[in-house]
C-alpha cells in the first residue's frame, strides 16, 4: 500500500519446513480475526520511492511494542518523505536514509534535522558522526603544535570513546553531560581501587590517575572549539551544545607547608593536597641548599621563587631582555615542550608578555651568574653556542624544561624538604607577595595573568599570618565599639 500498513509478526516457524511464519502465524489472530493481544509484535511497512536504478522497495520495521509505536514511526517516515515532494532526487536520498536506519537498527532521523539538511547542498548521506568529524578536524587544525597534541589526546582518550558514534548534528548537551558523568564514575572507581586492601586491585590502577578538573575543562574546550569550527564551516547549523555545559573549575587550593603539616608528613608520608607551597623560611632554606648543591640552576630557581615566572619563561628568558642596571627584565619568549621536544615560542597569552621589576638581592644573584657564565664561554671558545638565552648549561646549551623539573625534584627529595612541584615556586611567590601586602593587581601583572580574578582564585594561599591579621582586624573593629570602663 502506498500509504503503508501496520500489522503483527512473530518468530514462530512452520513445524514441517522450519521456515518463519511471519505474519501468517495463526496465533496472531483472535477468532474474530482481530489481532491477538498476547502473541507477536507490531510492525509496519511503507512503499518507498524507487532506487536510483529504478528498483521498487519497501520499508519494513518490526519488533515494536505497541500498535501506537508502529503508527507513530510510520507517520514519522511519511513526514520525512513529504519533505521532498516534487524533488525526485531528494526523495530517493531520504528513502535511502530510511532504509539505512532500519537495517542498522537506528531510530529514524528527526524531521527538523532533515529539513535543515535539505536547505543546504550536501548529501543526506554526509551526516558524519562526532568521531568522524573530530578525526578529520584534527588534520586541519591551525594551532601551535603543543595545543594540537593536547587536542589529539583529549579526542582519542575521551571524546571519541564517549561521543564518537553520535551523529554530529544530533549531539546535545545531555550527551556531553553523560560523558562527564561517566568520567566521574571512572574517577571514583580509580580512587576506590587505589584505597583497596586487595593488592591485586591496587596493582590494576598503578600509574592510572583520575581525570582532574583542569583536564575536564580542556575536554569541554576542545569539543567547543571543534563544534564552533563545524558551525563556521556550515557542516552543521544551530547552537553549540558544548558551550551550554557547565564544568566545575574545582581548582585545588594551594596549601602552605606550615609546621604541623610538615610534622604529619614526616610521620605518615602523606601530602595534604595536590598543590603545596613553601613558607618564606622554607624557600630561603631551599635556595641556600641549592646554591651549594646545584649552583648551575640556583639562579633560575631564585628568580622563580622571588618573581614567579613560569618554567618555560625562565628557560626561554633572552639575555638581551635582562637589564640588571635598570633592575628589570622582559618576558617575551619561552621554551615549551611538544611531547619531549623543546620548542621556542611566544608566551601563552598577551598578558604573558610583561616586564618584571627586580629586587636588589635578585640583581646580585643574576649578576654573579652572568659573570660565571662569561667564564664558561671563555673556556669553551669557539665551541660555545650562541643561543641568545640568559640561563644556559655550563656548555652553553639551553636547559630542557623537563630536565629542570627533574633536578628540582631530586634536590628536594635528597635534602628532605616537604615536597612541592617546581611550578609551586610560582604559587609561593604569589602567596608571599600578597602576604607582604603587595596589591593584587601588581601581583597579577607580575605573574602574567589576564585578570586579577585568576590570581586570587588560583595562587593566593592563605598563610597563618594572613588569617591572624584578619582575625585581629575584626576583633579590633568590635573592641572599638565597646564602652570604656573606668
Image: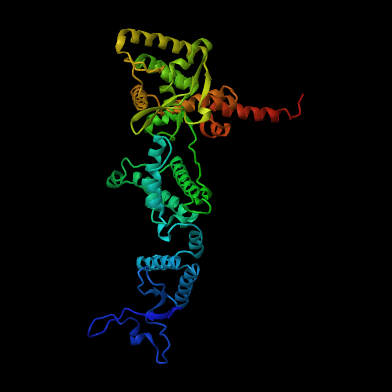
Q: Quadrant of the C terminus?
A: top right
- In percent of width and height, residue 239 lies at 53, 52
Camera-side residue: 340 or 265?
Answer: 340
Camera-side residue: 102 or 292?
Answer: 102
Can residue 383 be seen here? The reply is yes
Q: Residue at x 37, y 82 (%)?
A: 39
* Colouring rule applied to residues: rainbow
- In percent of width and height, residue 126 lies at 41, 57
**As displayed, is residue 459 above or below residue 325?**
below
- Quarter-wise, where is residue 202 in the image? top left
Q: Residue at x 55, y 27 (%)?
A: 444
Camera-side residue: 243 or 465?
Answer: 243
Can residue 210 be seen here? The reply is no
Q: Residue furthest left?
A: 16
Q: Residue at x 24, y 85 (%)?
A: 15
Q: Quadrant of the N terminus?
A: bottom left
* Total numbered labels placed on residues in the image: 0
**Left or right: 381 in relation to 447:** left
- In percent of width and height, residue 94 lies at 43, 66
- In percent of width and height, residue 100 lies at 37, 65
**As displayed, is residue 192 above or below residue 358?**
below
Amino acid at each position: 500500500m502506498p500509504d503503508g500498513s501496520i500489522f503483527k509478526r512473530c518468530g514462530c516457524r512452520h513445524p514441517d519446513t522450519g521456515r518463519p511464519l511471519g505474519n501468517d502465524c495463526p496465533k496472531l489472530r483472535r477468532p474474530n480475526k482481530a489481532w491477538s493481544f498476547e502473541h507477536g509484535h507490531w510492525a509496519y511497512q511503507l512503499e518507498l520511492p524507487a532506487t536510483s536504478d529504478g528498483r521498487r522497495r519497501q520499508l519494513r520495521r518490526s519488533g515494536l511494542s505497541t500498535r501506537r509505536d508502529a503508527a507513530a514511526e510510520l507517520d514519522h517516515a511519511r513526514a520525512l518523505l513529504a519533505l521532498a515532494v516534487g524533488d525526485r532526487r531528494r526523495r530517493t536520498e531520504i528513502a535511502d536514509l530510511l532504509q539505512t536506519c532500519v537495517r542498522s537498527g537506528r531510530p529514524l532521523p528527526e524531521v527538523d534535522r532533515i529539513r535543515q539538511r535539505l536547505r543546504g547542498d550536501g548529501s543526506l548521506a554526509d551526516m558524519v558522526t562526532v568521531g568522524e568529524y573530530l578525526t578529520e578536524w584534527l588534520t586541519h587544525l591551525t594551532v601551535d603544535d603543543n595545543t594540537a597534541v593536547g587536542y589529539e589526546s583529549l579526542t582519542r582518550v575521551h571524546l571519541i570513546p564517549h561521543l564518537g558514534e553520535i551523529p554530529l548534528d544530533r549531539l546535545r548537551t545531555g550527551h556531553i553531560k553523560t560523558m562527564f558523568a561517566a568520567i566521574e564514575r571512572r574517577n571514583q572507581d580509580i580512587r576506590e581501587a587505589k584505597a583497596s586492601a586487595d593488592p591485586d586491585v591496587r596493582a590494576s590502577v598503578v600509574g592510572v590517575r583520575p581525570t582532574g578538573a583542569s583536564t575536564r575543562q580542556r575536554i569541554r574546550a576542545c569539543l567547543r572549539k571543534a563544534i564552533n569550527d563545524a558551525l563556521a564551516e556550515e557542516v552543521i547549523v544551530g547552537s553549540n551544545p558544548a558551550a551550554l555545559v557547565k564544568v566545575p573549575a574545582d581548582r585545588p587550593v594551594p596549601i602552605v607547608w606550615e609546621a604541623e603539616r610538615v610534622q604529619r608528613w614526616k610521620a605518615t608520608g602523606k601530602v595534604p593536597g595536590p598543590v603545596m607551597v613553601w613558607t618564606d623560611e622554607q624557600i630561603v632554606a631551599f635556595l641556600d641548599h641549592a646554591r651549594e648543591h646545584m649552583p648551575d640552576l640556583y639562579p633560575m630557581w631564585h628568580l622563580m621563587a622571588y618573581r614567579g615566572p613560569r618554567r618555560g619563561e625562565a628557560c626561554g628568558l633572552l639575555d638581551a631582555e635582562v637589564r640588571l642596571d635598570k633592575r628589570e627584565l622582559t618576558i617575551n619568549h619561552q621554551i615549551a615542550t611538544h611531547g619531549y621536544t623543546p620548542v621556542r615560542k611566544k608566551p601563552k597569552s598577551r598578558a604573558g608578555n610583561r616586564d618584571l621589576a627586580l629586587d636588589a638581592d635578585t640583581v646580585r644573584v643574576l649578576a654573579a651568574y652572568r659573570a660565571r657564565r662569561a667564564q664558561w664561554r671563555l673556556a669553551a671558545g669557539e665551541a660555545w653556542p650562541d643561543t641568545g638565552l640568559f640561563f644556559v648549561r655550563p656548555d652553553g646549551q639551553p636547559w630542557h624544561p623537563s630536565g629542570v623539573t627533574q633536578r628540582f625534584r631530586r634536590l628536594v627529595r635528597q635534602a628532605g624538604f616537604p615536597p612541592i612541584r617546581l611550578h609551586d615556586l610560582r604559587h609561593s611567590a604569589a602567596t608571599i607577595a600578597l602576604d607582604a601586602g603587595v596589591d593584587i593587581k601588581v601581583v597579577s601583572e607580575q605573574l602574567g595573568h589576564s585578570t586579577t580574578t585568576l590570581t586570587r582564585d588560583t595562587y593566593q594561599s592563605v598563610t597563618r599570618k594572613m588569617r591572624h591579621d584578619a582575625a585581629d582586624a575584626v576583633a579590633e573593629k568590635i573592641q572599638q565599639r565597646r564602652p570604656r570602663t573606668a
